[in-house]
Image (tube, rainbow, N blue to C red):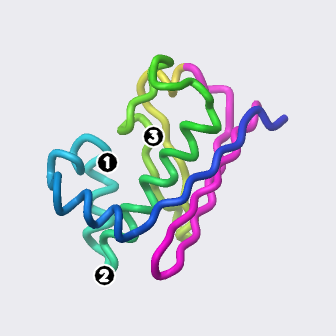
Amino acid sequence: MISGIGIDVVEIHRMKKIINEWGNTFLEKIFTENELSYAQSKKEYVQHLAARFAAKEAVAKAISTGWSGGFRWKDVEVTNDESGKPTIILSGKISETFNKHNIFISLSHSENVVVAFAVVEAK
């Protein structure tokens, strides 16, 4: 049974501006080491970070815990399986709360915008 959905859109130029202004302070607050390594291995580094940011936002909306519910940026990690399909790994308090749920994520992008759509399903 679907228990939540979330969507987020990020303009790539805005992500680039934030990274230029805040640098490592922003990157280390939002992204895991694995996410940063993955993005840095890609030609379009900022686009991949924007997609991961949008995914985290979409998941936050889908799980509906709000910031007071224990949501922390790094507790939602975006990875890719062997085929390249994006997947979500939860940790921390969110992992405990949603350990009986599946979380599905879809990412898409154009030259200027990325979009993420998340679905939370109770097992």
Residue that carries the numbered disc 1 in the rendered image: 31
Relative to 103, residue 65 above or below: above
Q: Are marks 2 and 1 in contact (CB under 8 Å)?
A: no
Q: Main secondary structure of the magenta part?
A: strand
Element type at marker 3?
strand
Quadrant of res 116: bottom right
Q: Are marks 3 and 2 in contact (CB under 8 Å)?
A: no
Please state the extent of the stretch shown in magenta in the rendering. 97-123
Quadrant of res 59: top right
Camera-nearest residue between 37 and 109? 109
Residue that carries the numbered disc 2 in the rendered image: 43
Residue 8 in the image, given as x and y percentages of width and height: 57, 53
Q: Which three-letter amino acid code belongs to the residue tagged 1? A: Phe
Q: Which mark is residue 51?
A: none
Relative to 46, residue 69 above or below: above
Q: Which three-letter amino acid code belongs to the residue tagged 3? A: Val
Element type at marker 2?
loop
Name which of mark 2 and mark 1 comes first in the sequence.
1
Name which of mark 3 and mark 1 comes first in the sequence.
1
- Tell me if 69 is positioned left or right of 92 in this view: right
Queried whether the magenta region covers residue 99, the answer comes back as yes
Between the C-alphas of marks 2 and 1, the distance is 18 Å
**Location of the C terminus (image quadrant):** top right
Residue that carries the numbered disc 3 in the rendered image: 76
Mark 1 surroundings within 10 Å by alpha-carbon count, few (fewer than 14), some (14 through 19), many (20 or more):
many
